[in-house]
Image (cartoon, rainbow, N blue to C red):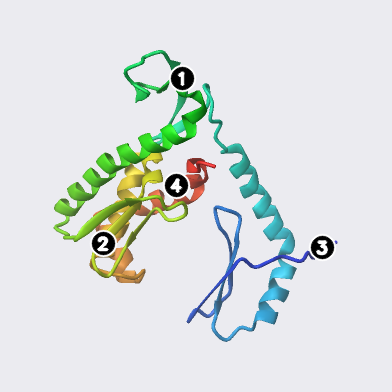
Amino acid sequence: MMMFFNIEIDKIVRSKRRSIALEISNSGELIVRAPHSVTMNYLKKLVAGKSEWIIDKQKVIFKKIEESRKEYRFGGKFYYLGKEYEIIPSYDNENIIYFQDNFFINVKYEDQIKDLIAQWYKFQANKIIKDRVFGLSDDFNLDFKKITITGAEKRWGSCSSRKHLNFSWRLIMAPVEIIDYVVVHELAHLKELNHSSRFWALVGSMLPEYKKCEKWLRNNSFKFRLD
C-alpha cells in the first residue's frame, strides 16, 4: 500500500523546460525543477505522490551527513587533498599545528582544534587552489581579473561577469583532480557565463574526464563538511 506524506518543497527552479524533475541536494533539500506554466498546487500533489521515494532518498543523505560529522579531538580524522588523516597530539612548542602524514596539534590547544584546522585549511587553500588557477588559466590562455578564496559552505566556486573568480577554501579537502575540475568549470565561465551546450563543450575540451569528476563530487562532497 502506497503511503502519502506531507513533504515540504525547499526550492523551486522554474525555466523553459518541458518536464518536471525532483532533486535531493547533498544537504537533503528537495529541489523541484519545473516549467513556468505548472501550478504550485500541481507540484504539491506530484511531490505528495512521490513522498516515499523522497523520504527514502533523504534518509540516505541524512545518514551520510551524520556519518561525516567531524570529531574535534585527538584521534579525529580530517580530509586533505582527498585523503583522510588523523589528529595527533604534539608536544612541539614551536608549532601549534603542522602536517606530516597526519595533523599534529599542540596538546595545549586541544580545545581549539576546530578553529586551528579551519585556519590551516584556509592557509593551504590560498596557496594550492590559487596555484591551480594560475597554472590552468595559463594552459588554456584564459584571463581573469581577480581570484578570492571564500568561506562558502555550499558553493565550491563561482565566476562573475567582471571575471572575478571565487573558490571555497573547503575545496582543499578534495583530491587535486577534483580541485582542477572546479577550477576548469569556473575558468570556462570566463568565455561562457552560462551552462549551455557550448559551455559544456568548452569544459570537455579542457578536461575530457570532467563528467567523472562531476559525479565524484556529487557523490562525495558530503565528506567535506565541517559541522
Residue lying at 52% horizontally and 45% vertically, measured from the top left: 222
Q: Secondary structure at mark 4?
A: helix
Residue 33: image location, x then y, percent: 55, 72
Residue 197: image location, x then y, percent: 34, 70
Q: In which quadrant will I find the N terminus?
A: bottom right
Please state the total of marks drawn on the protein image. Answer: 4
Name the N-terminal-most of marks 3 and 2: 3
Tell me the CA gap for discs 3 and 1: 54 Å
In this rendering, is residue 5 above or below 180? below
Name the residue carrying label 3.
3
Check disc 3 and give the amino acid type. Met
Check disc 2 and give the amino acid type. His
Q: Nearer the viewer, mark 3 or mark 1?
A: 1
Check disc 4 and give the amino acid type. Trp
Q: Secondary structure at mark 1?
A: helix
Check disc 1 and give the amino acid type. Lys
Name the N-terminal-most of marks 1 and 2: 1
Q: Secondary structure at mark 3?
A: loop
Residue lying at 23% horizontally and 50% vertically, measured from the top left: 133
Residue 9: image location, x then y, percent: 64, 68
Name the N-terminal-most of marks 4 and 1: 1
Mark 1 nearby-residue class (10 Å; few <14, some 14–19, many ≥20)? few
Residue 221: image location, x then y, percent: 48, 46
In this rendering, is residue 147 above or below 44? above
Name the residue carrying label 1.
108
Tell me the CA gap for discs 4 and 3: 33 Å
Name the N-terminal-most of marks 3 and 1: 3
Q: Which mark is residue 164?
A: 2
Q: Is residue 142 among what the camera can see?
A: yes
Name the residue carrying label 4.
216
Q: Nearer the viewer, mark 3 or mark 2?
A: 2
